Amino acid sequence: MEWLIWIGAAAALAGVAGLVWCVILALGLRRSSLPEEAQRAQLRRVVVINMAALGLSALGLVLVVAGIILR
């Protein structure tokens, strides 16, 4: 079950990288000179990406724990 731990760790790291990317996107939106409505639309997109990254990270941690338990 060691492969499950490695797959889970990779998924968790990919999720964390996605979260960092969302922070960078949100800070870029904050500094942009877009109209408020356009900023809101872009921010909705960032929130969707953020939730997906958070889910991937959580799934990766579940896989790591399952791999450790089944070891």
Image (cartoon, grey):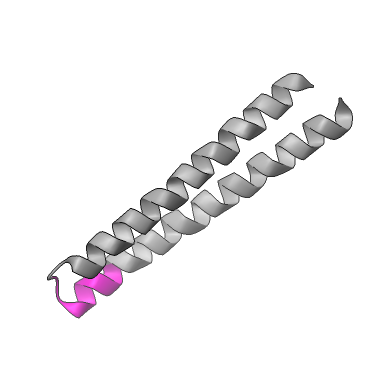
Q: Quadrant of the N terminus?
A: top right
Q: Residue at x 20, y 71 (%)?
A: 38
Give the percent coordinates (x, y) of residue 48. 44, 59
Q: Is residue 54 above or below residue 38?
A: above
Quadrant where the image shows the C terminus: top right
Q: In this image, 71 relative to 52: left or right? A: right
Q: Is residue 40 magenta?
A: yes
Residue at the image point whose x is 51% and y is 46% from the top: 16
Residue at the farthest left position: 33
Tell me which corner region of the image, top left, top right, bottom left or bottom right, holds residue 63: top right
Segment tinted magenta in the rendering: 34-41
Q: In the picture shown, does residue 2 fall above or below 29?
A: above
Residue 68 quadrant: top right
Query: Residue lying farthest bottom?
Result: 36
The spot of residue 53 in percent (x, y) is 50, 50
Q: Give the left or right position of residue 9, taking residue 52 as reference.
A: right
Of residue 51 and residue 65, the one placed in the foreground of this image is 65
Question: Of helix, strand and loop, which mostly describes the magenta segment?
Answer: helix
The residue most toward the right is: 70
Q: Is residue 20 above or below residue 64?
A: below
Tell me if residue 54 is in the magenta stretch. no
What residue is drawn where x is 35% and y is 61%?
45
